Amino acid sequence: MSKHICRFCNSGKISSRLLFDNFPLAPQSTKNPRFENFDFLIGICDECFLIQQLSEVPSEILYREFKNDVVGEKLNNQKLSFFKYITHYLKKNMTVLEMGAGNGFVVNKLAELNKSIRFIANDYNLNIKNESSNIVMLEGDIHDYEFDDIDIFFSSHVFEHIADPTYHLKKIKRMLKIDGLYIMAIPLFQSWIKKLNLNSFTTEHLIYPFEDDLIAFFNNMGFEKVSSEVYLDHSLFICFKKLDSSPKPILAKSKQSYLDNFSKNLDDLSNLLLNISSKHKKIVLWGANTSSQLLLNIMNKIDNLECSFAVVDNSKLKINGYLFGTDIKIDQPDIITTLSQKDAVVIMVGTFDDEIKRQCALINPNVKIYDKSFICSD
Ligand SMILES: [Zn+2]
């Protein structure tokens, strides 16, 4: 067995905790069915307690075909909320860099309202329309560039994808001025894992830090926490400042109980799915992403399945594609109108469940909906 090294503290003491065997390599929709799979393994560091992916996924597979658009009120509001969080730290004539700017929703809005500030937008495939004149475009890997005058570095839902956070933060620290800020939005893993969000563990996420893991890690790298804010049950916004001296070490707390609880919830989910598959003819899974891949992965282990499956998604980019790892074509949610009382919809997409349940009930008020309340109460 290969030896795993902790992505935060370099310790070799890592315990394997969750294994999803024969799991699809990427959480996305593809033009043609693709079936590459692997043993998706999650572990925890016995020294610093970081929950992390132990398996290696080739990044060219993860991001080659990947397309996503921002759908839903909650995700849009998350971006607006993060925009406000960053605005709080802006001062005249600063230089501000965003890693993973994508379509530029946040950086463009900041640039329009702060004309004295120089913004640098970085990504592999920048797709910013009508960009503000004070934005400089920077294509490619941020780690290949050198700066020494950055006042604020920020990113939204990028940090958890980084394979080597230590290398990353060393590089970015050199780019920042003393007292410069590192601001990020990341999934609220503490809540996601606690509440059995089936999108918690996706093959794209290499690390699953809680707030105290980030504080310990950044502290160790010469930063101190300035502030943090939680956006609903969805994201953690956190801001660190680069210090000119080494602060005293801070330790994070154990995360064992979170993974134990997640495993127990998965067992209950497995029993629920066995029950659902025996009762219904057709089962619609909502969300062309990891959550449906996980549900199918569990149901594939059930013998003599007699029900059929469909997958629906609100993202127009995914409709008519296939859910990676299956030959199931992704449909629009409208197909739910055709369901009979013998059929069912499973809505376990994570932090968007309430929004989607409302949408589903509008499409077909009579259809049976299964959600997380059937397995865990909180
Ligand atoms: Zn560690």
Image: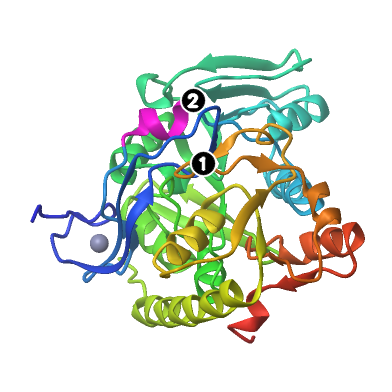
Nearer the observer: mark 1 or 2; the answer is 1
Q: Residue at x 68, y 27 (%)?
A: 104
Disc 1 marks a residue whose amino acid type is Asp
Q: Is residue 377 above or below residue 40?
A: below
Residue 327, which numbered label? Answer: 1
Q: In the depicted view, which residue is nearer to us: 372 or 35?
A: 35
Location of residue 117 (image quadrant): top right
Q: Residue at x 41, y 70 (%)?
A: 303
Location of residue 346 (image quadrant): bottom right
Q: Is residue 62 magenta?
A: yes
Please tell me how crowded label 2 is: few (under 14), some (14-19), or many (20+) other residues with Cα within 10 Å.
some
Q: Residue at x 88, y 70 (%)?
A: 366
Q: Which residue is mark 2?
A: 149
Q: CA distance from mark 1 to mark 2?
A: 50 Å
Disc 2 marks a residue whose amino acid type is Asp
**Does any atom of ligand 1 lie closer than 8 Å to the CB of label 1?**
no
- Mark 1 near mark 2, Cβ–Cβ under 8 Å? no
Q: Which quadrant does ligand 1 occupy?
A: bottom left
Q: Is residue 4 magenta?
A: no
Earlier along the polypeptide chain: callout 1 or callout 2?
2
State left or right for residue 349 relative to residue 24: right
- Element type where label 2 sits in the image: loop
State left or right for residue 4 relative to residue 36: left
Q: Is residue 144 above or below residue 100?
A: above
Residue 271 percent coordinates (x, y): 49, 81
Identify the image's colour scheme: rainbow, by chain, secondary structure or one colour: rainbow
Location of residue 43 (image quadrant): bottom left
